[in-house]
Amino acid sequence: MHEREILNHVHKIRCWSIGKASEGEAEVNPIIAASWDRCLRHYRINPGEPDPVRVLMGAELREYSGPIERFLRIAQKAVQYLHRQVAALGYCTMLCDANGITVDWLGDERLSRQWKAAGLCLGSVWNESREGTCGIGTALVEQVPLTVYNGEHFRAKHADLTCSCAPVIGPGHKTMGGIAVSSFVSPAFKDSQHLALQLVIQAARMVECAFFLSQCEDRWILRLSVERELAEVSSECFLAMDGAGRIVAADRVAHCRLAGEIGGGSLLGRPIGETLDVDFRKLLEMFSRSSMVLPVRLQKSGLRMFASLRFPRAAAVSSAGSIVASASRGRRVPMAGTPLSLDYLTGEDPKLRACVERIKRVMNKPISILLQGETGTGKEVFARAIHHASRRSDKPFVAVNCAAIPESLIESELFGYKEGAFTGARSKGMRGKILQSDGGTLFLDEIGDMPASLQTRLLRVLAEREVTPLGGETPIPVDLHVICATHHNVADLVGLGAFREDLFYRLNGVSFELPPLRQRSDLASLIRDVLAIEAGTGGAPALVEDEAMRIMEAHPWPGNIRQLCNVLRYALAMCDKRVITCGDLPADITGSRHSGEVAQMRCLEKDRRCLPEAPPEDDTAFLADEAIAGLNAMEQAERQVIMQSLQKHKWQITRAVREIGISRATMYRKMDKYAIVPPNKH
Ligand SMILES: Nc1ncnc2c1ncn2[C@@H]1O[C@H](COP(=O)(O)OP(=O)(O)OP(=O)(O)O)[C@@H](O)[C@H]1O
């Protein structure tokens, strides 16, 4: 800027300060005027002073950006998005903290000398008390979005710049920072900055909403919008509520719009029923039936708005209506049908956590893993999760249930065979499960049931890392990682001579005991997770009354997680308005607590038998009436699940067991127990 222009700018401000507009000057915008006034009276800035803008670097800058890391992470995304829209127009995009310090900057690097000379760079301090009236500093003081254009800047040295900035206001009306676009070349009229300002306002609002949602993720969040059609994609107000339905946070817009509904004052601490025409319990009921946008009315003005409710990560509701906040917050619940990840399976039980930590250390090493645990403790899902978390995840995971395959077939299943190896063999031969898992993971379930003759062959494969198919002569090299599982105590089997000791040591590179459900301390959070998985994307997870939760926590769970899943599915079918009460639980859960069941289940486990698969035929099945008559509610529910699945899959056991999530051996045992006979067998 030339000497003459500087003198003109200083003269203009001097004239304004004594109430005289200098010749040819338009009236000064009231917000700019208020800022000039502050600059003259409070900050005592000389408008002609040429000092450069202060720029913080290195550790000094990190001192400011460190404490606002979470805000930064969210806001940087919005700044990048905004910059893509304005970069071609010669703007730089800036993110500043509440002190006006530029904590992120994006601009054309080829012009870095000019940006720096203008003070538009990372670390620059755009504080009104130092730089006088400017986009960032004044927007932060006034807490409104604005453009400061050319000569509206207080200091003459900034009179070539244009800057549009919108402050970002966080929950609790706290200024988090500001987002700005600036340029050192400005078109002839201030109106040219109108769209730039709108884009900045939009970006700042996006950050406010995202930050509110992230800060209040363990709260009930009510989003309100005036337009039904837009309610799902953009909300005007955000309110966060605690488990009793009291407002614990409100965003900037909610404070402005809704304070009148409670006759002024703060919204915080007020029950939601004072603002809306429905109380918290009614809200929960409405949204437990539907995850859609629903109409509500503001209590005082009667204005109709459209609401949507976001649940905390997980929650339980007590019969009195108080909501117990989630214990499992922060955990991502997978969708039904997707593999459960190792991190998810870690749960919140300290023993299980320690177990998973150890698994993570060995899963990428050439060490076999042995998973032990009662039926239904999740051995197979753990094996899958280990595979997916390991370096082998892009290679196959092949599961073999040694108890479910008839002894006569297990050898060919595992090792494969050459063409014409035996009568009935497929003409092209078959790659066995071991070769199918080459490069990936071989999961040998129920390893304790592997026939003795095959134990020797398996040992050789593991020792030599090559396999010779039946009827073949040349061994084929194989790269495999073996995970085994069993509900037996394999060391006992070794002692009894039923399992080869050398194979046991090779398979048992490292072993993990998955705790039964009755020993886990995170049952409540597991229940909430299972309900969230069951809800899928189709709506909010069902809630559990305190008393129902207590009963489930006290149950011995002989069938472990599988049994728990079935009980919850039963309760979901029985419950009203997606709130599970004691009355929705099967009778043997509410009236049980007899530990004899545990022993009974274990005996049944030992009875596992393998039956040949039934071919599809007729779509009906025979079930003896007397067999149904003696079943309790839980058993009836279980029978129904099995029957429905078998009928759906035309009696293809493999498909039914995959759907229900039980092993084939368990399926045959259950069919036996419930006298379910395939149509071609009566
Ligand atoms: N952490 C979990 N969260 C939700 N569901 C789970 C969890 N762990 C296991 N399950 C479910 O429990 C059921 C039993 O799991 P899995 O088959 O892995 O147990 P298992 O110990 O291998 O049983 P079995 O010894 O009878 O073969 C499956 O339906 C599985 O999806």
Image (cartoon, rainbow, N blue to C red):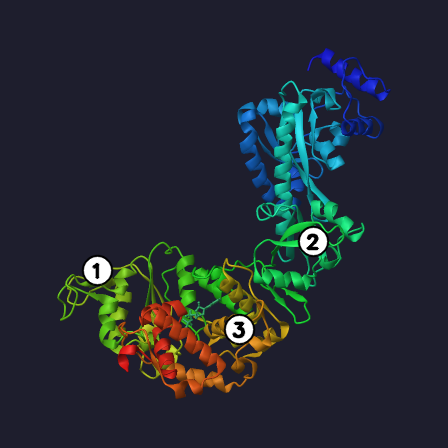
Q: Residue at x 54, y 84 (%)?
A: 592
Q: Secondary structure at mark 3?
A: helix
- Image quarter where the C terminus lies is bottom left
Camera-nearest label, 3 or 2? 2
- Secondary structure under the numbered disc 2 in the rendered image: strand
Percent of width and height locating residue 632: 48, 83
Q: Quadrant of the N terminus?
A: top right
Q: Is residue 120 visible?
A: no
Residue 100 position (above or below residue 90): below
Q: Is residue 155 above or below residue 198?
A: above
In percent of width and height, residue 536 lies at 49, 60
Q: Cα distance, mark 3 to mark 1?
A: 55 Å
Using the rendered view, name the quadrant where residue 463 is placed. Answer: bottom left
Q: Is mark 1 within 8 Å of ligand 1?
A: no
- Residue designated by label 3: 574
Estimate how packed mark 2 is, as few (under 14), some (14 to 19) or many (20 or more) residues with alpha carbons within 10 Å: some
Q: Which mark is residue 89?
A: none
Left or right for 1, reference 420: right
Who comes first in sequence, dot 3 or dot 2?
Answer: 2
**Which residue lies under the disc numbered 2?**
297
- Quick check: marks 2 and 1 in contact, CB under 8 Å? no
Location of mark 1 (residue): 476
Q: Amino acid at mark 1?
A: Ile
- As shown in the figure, which amino acid type bears the numbered disc 3? Met
Taking the image in four quarters, ligand 1 sits in the one at bottom left
Q: Quadrant of residue 108?
A: top right
